[in-house]
Image (cartoon, rainbow, N blue to C red):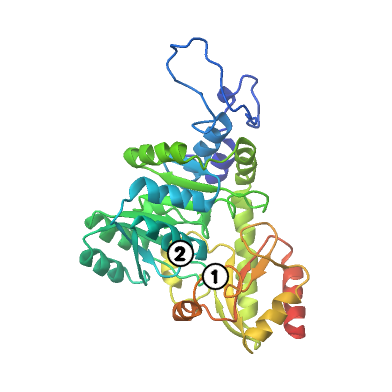
Amino acid sequence: MRGFTTRAVHVGEEPSRSLYGDVVHPIHLSVTFRKKRVSEAEEGYVYSRTSNPTRDALEKKLAALEGAKYGLAFSSGLAAESTIILALLSKGDTIIAFDDLYGGTKRLFERVAARFGIRVVYVDARRPENVERELARSRSARMVWVETPTNPLLKLADLRAISEVSSSHGAILVVDNTFASPYFQNPLSLGADIVVHSATKYLSGHSDLVAGAVMVNDSELYERLRYHQNAIGAVLPPFDSWLLMRGLKTLALRMERHQYNAMRIAEHLEASSKVARVIYPGLESHPQHELARKQMRGYSGMLSFELEGGPARAVRFVENLKIIALAESLGGVESLIEIPALMTHASIPREERLRLGISDSLIRLSVGIEDLEDLIEDIDNALKTA
């Protein structure tokens, strides 16, 4: 297999896919495709919801980067997650899920999937035995769902161990790989059945499109997901597919810079008397640092921290930054910061947030690719002001 960046640049862009030898795959905006005869078998392209040349090229690239046989592109990460649930679960089925998940995923589980009779049991998946216990206890468990690292507490799940217990109980293991990206972690190689991404984040990398991605190796799973991708229709349009292909070509370069900046900033914050704690898998102080070294090739660009002084100081800090933008989302070239309890995870009841460790003063930082010295100066100035 060729190297990661070679695949990122060239897969899906082969000259044989174009009539004119385009170096960059063109954008195919056509909704429908001409047939020569009424009786002509429906091979090739018929209608762009079902398949489109630009989206097909993107899906090849997505699969290649995740080390998968198949890739599927969706109109958002939640569209991808919804399709997984509708394609593979039925009324009465149970999902065993990591208790620390993106708030939008929990909302999907609790306010949408629950209406169709799908039950979710949350466990602390840092301990694989917790997953195994619930799988053994539930006769209806059909799926295990984890993020690693999690959003926003950067907890890790031992994917090889959890894949073994999931497989032994006949459950499908779904891994949200958004925070790590395929550059730093490949869950399929560790036993996962399905990998899902909010491609809006690191895969795109430029905060200019919303997209989702699913990658699998199993042919039967792929056919079921592809059928529902078409039937539900939450597909990624051609222009957005082209934009995502463009972003993927620099994924390796961006992830290296994200990680470099994040590690230096995590160390800088940890050394500050104004910071109560820093959470970053690359730090030796992270309780699962050894697991991160074992199953990841790097630590990505996400970190969380708490300031001394409580929620009011946290608010003053984020509101006084000049370069780092106070905004939701993550994974773009620009640094973004937020307070989960007031923003991305506000829909989760406060008691539940506190139980998980998401305090009112927790700050999540998506470290961008700006000059490190400028980011540290911005942080230091805001700390003084706060």
Viewer-nearest residue: 70 or 211: 211
For the residues marked 1 and 2, what is the alpha-carbon distance in whole angstroms? 10 Å
313 shown above or below 356: below
Which image quarter holds the C terminus?
bottom right
Is the Cβ of the residue at disc 1 closer than 8 Å to that at disc 2? Answer: no
The image quarter in which residue 19 lies? top right
Viewer-nearest residue: 54 or 295: 54
Please state the horizontal and vertical placement of residue 364, each as a whole percent of the image. 60, 71
Please state the horizontal and vertical placement of residue 170, each as a whole percent of the image. 24, 53
The image quarter in which residue 25 lies? top right
186 shown above or below 149: above
Three-letter code for the amino acid on which mark 1 is drawn? His
Please state the horizontal and vertical placement of residue 314, each as a whole percent of the image. 66, 81
**What's the residue at 50%, 49% (across, down)?**
79
Q: Secondary structure at mark 2?
A: helix
Of the two numbered discs 1 and 2 on the same chain, state the one appearing first in sequence. Answer: 2
Residue 39 got which mark? Answer: none
Q: Which residue is mark 2?
A: 106
Q: Secondary structure at mark 1?
A: loop
Viewer-nearest residue: 206 or 186: 206
Please state the horizontal and vertical placement of residue 246, each as a whole percent of the image. 64, 41
Q: Which residue is mark 1?
A: 345
Three-letter code for the amino acid on which mark 2 is drawn? Lys
Decide if residue 303 is in sight here.
Answer: yes
Numbered circles on residues, count: 2
